[in-house]
Image: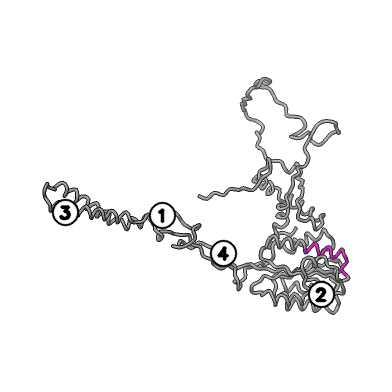
Amino acid sequence: MQQIIDRRLAGKNKSIGNRERFLRRHKEQIREAVKRAIDGRSISDVERGEDIHIPKKDLSEPVFGHGPGGVREVVHPGNKDFVQGDRIERPKGGQGGGGSGKGQASDSGEGEDDFVFALSKEEFMQVFFEDLALPHLVRTQLAEMPEWKSQRAGFSSDGTPNNLHVVRSMRGALGRRIALGNGPRRELHAMEERLAEMQAALQPGDVVAEAAVKALAEEIRLLRGRIERIPYLDPIDLRYRSRIKVPVPTSKAVMFCLMDVSGSMDEARKELSKRFFILLYLFLTRHYEKIDLVFIRHHTQAQEVDEQNFFHARETGGTVVSSALVLMEEIIKARYDPAQWNIYGAQASDGDNWHHDSGRCREILSEKILPLVRYFAYVQVAEEEQNLWDEYTQLQAAHRHFAMRKAVQASEIYPVFRDLFKKEGAKAA
């Protein structure tokens, strides 16, 4: 029988089980509170906890009560104030609390406020990301260097001491001793019985009979020695738990983050793009252990950078969006085989592009990028629909795994992000 002991630390006067049930019961209200908190936070504070307010009326629980009518006899232990037939008045002021919420202000009395509890950092992020997932994530074929998992493969006669199976080893030792000792023991018992008969029939002075008794006794002694030399536990009895490694398919994913840093992208628009990519980064690193992130920033030229330069470098210039798409295609061909990797792309821009380049962007996406990726999301951080938006709109009907949205205010980043990366079948926030 296996026992699982939950040793997670619980605070004073707190129950983890009760807290989890409470979170499940008020899930919708907590989700709305998390959404409001994200809208009003800076990026650096996105992972901290939050105080959640639950109205008092939502905490009420159903109760059973006796209906009117009928004859009931109730015994009140220690009753000194009432006798049979007395009518007991209801408490004044409504049920619970200090009053019904009506009437004039007073300098006395008490009531109940909204219930407030603290949502931890882990609980906050769990609620935020609970219904998000990379769309169309599937297991690819075995890679050249597949992951391995260990699984049981019976028992073997060699292994490490920590894998020794004591019960099976002792069972094998017992069987070996029985197999090797049963025949000699039966022979020993027969010889001992014959020796007893010969000693009983031995006559004084019978030299031949005495010699036969001595010979039989010597045989018995030798046989006992042979039985005693059977080892209690022999190396051939040892049995070890055997485990083998088997290859398993891996779900490897790579996310390409493309951000426009041209002169038309002012600080407010760059901040919106940063918010989107930081939420995406937190989401991916939380839910997927085997995932690569490729950061590409572009103006007239595109370059692959690390996370620090992606968010904080100040280099700027004109706008040639196709440079980022060309670099993305080159990186995919060089490092990420679509047969072994689930490839995703997310692009953030204000939509302003050199007018001769937008058509080329659509062609590159349609002919070279979208056939390789499982999902590509474009987020425009400007309200005005410019030539890049018009070109990308032509791709939506033909490519179901291509999505585009607008986010022109910080408060719109959260619902746009959830809409783009919601689980299949889940409703957007």
Q: Position of residue 172 (x, y in %)?
A: 39, 57
Start-end of magenta stretch = 264-277
Q: Which residue is mark 2?
A: 321
Q: Is 265 inside the magenta-drawn segment?
A: yes
User: In the rendered structure, which disc, 3 or 4, sits on the residue that comes first in sequence?
Assistant: 4
* Spatial CA span between label 3 and label 4: 69 Å
Residue 131 or residue 14, whichever sits in front: 14
Kindly state the secondary structure of the residue where label 2 is placed: loop
Residue in the picture at 48% in, 63% down: 153
* Spatial CA span between label 1 and label 2: 73 Å
Residue 111 or residue 223, whichever sits in front: 223
Q: Are marks 4 and 2 in contact (CB under 8 Å)?
A: no
**In the figure, is residue 154 to the left or right of 198?**
right
**In the figure, is residue 230 to the left or right of 302?**
left
User: In the rendered structure, which disc, 1 or 2, sits on the residue that comes first in sequence?
Assistant: 1
**Quarter assignment of residue 79:** top right
* Spatial CA span between label 4 and label 2: 43 Å
